[in-house]
Image (cartoon, helix red, strand yellow):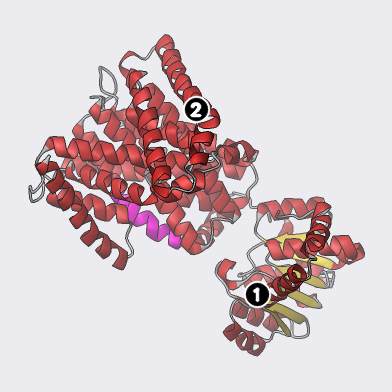
Amino acid sequence: MHELIGDITLCILFAWVLGLAAQFSRQPSILAYLIAGFVIGPFGTGWVKSQDSISVISELGLIFMLFMIGLEIDLKKIIRAGPVILIAGGVQIIGGALLGLLFFIAVGVAMGEGHYDALYLGVACALSSTVIIVKVLYEKRELDTLPGRITLGILVLQDVFAILFLAVQPSLDNLQISVIVLSFARAGTLVAIALLLSRYVLPQLFHRVARSPELILLGALAWCFLIAEIAEQLQLSREMGSLVAGVSLSTFPYALDVTAKVTTLRDFFITLFFVALGMTIPVPNMSVVGLALIVALFTVASRLLSTFTPLFLMRQGLRASLLPAINLAQISEFSLVIIQTGVAAGHLRGETSNAASFAFVVLAVLSTFVIVRSDPITRRTIPLLKRLGLRDLDHGQAHEAGDKAGHGAGRPIVILGFFRTASALLAEIERNQPALLDRIGVIDFNPVVFRTLSERGIQVTYGDISNVDTLVHAGIGHAELIVLSVPDALLKGASNEKLVRHVRAINGTAKIVATADLIADVNDLYDAGADYVVLPRLNNAQVLLNLIEAASGGLLAERRSHAEALLADRREVLP
């Protein structure tokens, strides 16, 4: 016991020190934890040698990590996911796993006679890192863009796939139809027990202790370990039980409260898991490094093939098909979980596990930089794909737009970039001045916007507004009023100031309305050639002030009824 406490102390201390270094160098914290484990583990300094300590630390961390992953799986979002995400996710996961299985068998990785290295690597390579992707996309403010939503939807489906694999994993040594059915029956029984208890028992219990934070936390932990132990009794893994425990609470009324209370413990035990994983990584030999590089290269190639292809075939456009493939091109921390459970079950060799861990590290570092630079990478790649014969949504559009521009047939009012403000503007025009719609044209590269506006009869040009050629071909030189409604924080490859200068160079007489994020940007936009600058927060502030006055006068309910009536019949492109 004293040895375990000392080992945990070393784990946390080195994880903290190297975590600080990772933050300063803008590297993934998971990478720092793996290195910390390697440094203090048996293959590093040897300060932590006890295999029992490493095993206990790893299993505790794994149970908590899966519990938290389960809490963040929103089943309602999966049900509401559109066919694009469901089809793309299904093709990416199943296609990626099958491609991986066949590829690794072809390169000589073991498969059969009690060894399932190729299968585990195929499944591991089909999953992407939620931690890395969400962190980077959040910092880039791209979680709510179309490629961001597709990426997140596929990540959720990957988690569901991992649950199903964990259900079958204990039976891989005797994989028959009856065994598979029995495994799913056990998993179904576990899920049924968890859902029934979470719906009919837990609400009353948590309602009684809702005002007691320590009991909320204790209840969440008790629930996690209870379902984990039930899973163990059903001959499933405790890890799968903790995942199901989290999923069953994800739609629970107190889920947000539980998540908030458990977050600190989650970070603690996730840190322990990855440090313990790092302890198991030996000094690599050439065969491990070679296999790791093969795994990393295959992961990137298969992700581009299995993600880009279905999205492109469903006419999402080159950009919206490429970006999710780039975002997902790494190995998941969940993959390491699956690999570790396979090692514990004796299904694959330690060399394969080490290679997967090294591939995870390589891709974690590289994909962080690539996702940050995904927009310029996409801009350079799209022309190459077009030269290879792949047609974007603007195929045949440039020539048509050029003819219109040459004959002065461009729309007098042009909206550059289409996000929620522009969506609300069109809905307002449709409601109050529908005749004005015939005078409006839109330029944007969102395929949903392109299809929806085309179906409504509104002229829309599919293209990147940061590209001057797009503006010229769209007939911007003949516009009378040009509206830039997207703030700088959401623009890709441009800024409002840059766009104003481009537009003014093409059209010296049009009136230009631009959007500013900061008060300091207003004068810069006027100097660039804007005729009017909108500062959205001033309008929001005025609305809030009116509501405060309405509340003081007892008119807030009346204002709400009026607002609900306005929302009732709106047909916005981006809800």
Q: From where the camera sits, is residue 302 visible? A: no
- Residue pointed to by mark 2: 197
Quadrant of the rendering where the N terminus is positioned: top left
Report the amino acid beneath label 1: Arg
Near-viewer residue (386 or 58): 58
Report the amino acid beneath label 2: Leu
What's drawn in magenta, residue-wise? 360-373
Near-viewer residue (547 or 213): 213
The location of residue 113, given as percent across then percent down, is 25, 17
Task: Name the secondary structure under disc 1.
Answer: helix
Hey, which quadrant is residue 469 in on the image? bottom right
Residues marked 1 and 2 touching at CB (< 8 Å) = no
The number of callouts visible is: 2
Q: Is residue 118 left or right of residue 412?
A: left
Q: Is residue 233 left or right of residue 257?
A: left
Q: From where the camera sits, is residue 59 visible? A: yes
- Residue pointed to by mark 1: 537
Q: Give the crowd class for mark 2: few <14, some 14-19, many >=20 residues within 10 Å.
A: some
